[in-house]
Image (cartoon, rainbow, N blue to C red):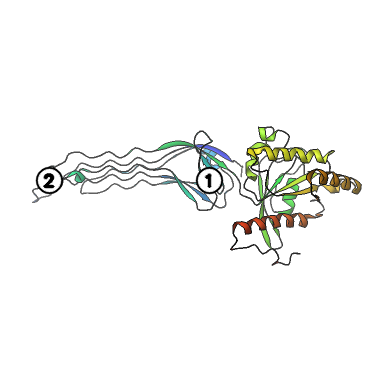
Amino acid sequence: MKFLDQARIFIKSGPGGAGAVSFRREKYIEFGGPDGGDGGKGGDVWVEAVENLNTLIDYRYQQHFKAEIGMHGMGRNRTGRQGEDVVLKVPVGTQIFEEDNETLIADLTEPGERVRLARGGNGGFGNAHFKSSTNQAPRHANPGQDAEERTIWLRLKLIADAGLVGLPNAGKSTFLATVTRAKPKIADYPFTTLTPNLGVARIDNREFVIADIPGLIEGAHEGVGIGDRFLGHVERTRVLLHLVSAQEDDVAEAYQTVRTEIDAYGDGILADKPEVLALSQIDTVDEETVREKSDALEAIAGHKPIRLSSATHHNLDLVQRALMDEIADQREAENPSQPDNRWQSGET
């Protein structure tokens, strides 16, 4: 399945049905009177967040959605049928914007959450509605109300617990493939990852979702490379795993480059997120080089990095536990009545 995180679509609700002008005509009934029914209401356009979706690819091939028109009223006081609604199914984490792509309409963060984007027009009154003592044979009815139409943007921001960040070829996809069942593309050239990937990791009988985004380069927050477009997918994460490759000539500069882009993105939206720092791909260099680069990273970051090798599984569990502990702390802070007992499974 292809990944698409942004789509522009046109929506239109259903106009209401017109009321009917009709008179009762039956044998032996001298004064039948008006019996025109009301028109039916037009269908609404809704958007609903559903599980088991992680892309907006369906909206690449269909961009126009129109709800059904309300049926017209009929004689014998029959009301027209209401038009059927249109429900747009989108992944959890989808935001809906106005046509300017800046004005937020709704942010769907929970499964089953629904928002009405366009209301169908009400049906018009039939002539039976206008009968009175002074007007016993009204010969007019109301038309149905007009439909609402608008152009909107759908923008997906994946919901994950942990986000992987780093320069291209820092080992993010290899880490994701090793700790989850995700199958991202892995190769020895930059920007192997072109779209975000999600995977579910499990450690000590606890699960969390990891999002891997394309590598960041200098100027990413200004649109350089492809990282800027996908940084939004780690906005909702609780913790960032920052991988710095041991193959970098200057690990301090590599760390600072990514941190600068993270801090500058979205007026500091990501700047305050907890960070787990790891020196990755340590199996590709000798032990002395690992020590030197680990010390250099500690000097600039202010805390000691975890020495990690996804290929040999060195410290793989340690990194996952560090991420899980940060996630558990935040889950407990968000839901104090339902604490995440990290020690229940025997973790030490």
**Can residue 213 be seen here?**
yes
Specify which label sits upstream in the sequence, 2 or 1: 1
* Rendered location of residue 171, percent (x, y): 77, 45
In terms of depth relative to the viewer, which is nearer, 286 or 307?
307
Q: Which residue is mark 1?
A: 107
Q: Residue at x 73, y 40 (%)?
A: 259
Q: Which residue is mark 2?
A: 133
Circle 2: residue type: Ser
Say whether residue 310 is left or right of residue 119. right
What residue is rendered at 71% in x and 66% in y?
345
Percent coordinates x, y for residue 292 in the rendering? 88, 45
- Numbered badge on residue 17: none
Q: Are marks 2 and 1 in contact (CB under 8 Å)?
A: no
**SS at mark 2 in the image:** loop
The part of the image, by quadrant, that contains residue 215 is: top right
Which residue is located at x 69 percent, y 40 percent? 263
- The secondary structure type at the circle numbered 1 is strand
What residue type is disc 1 on? Asp
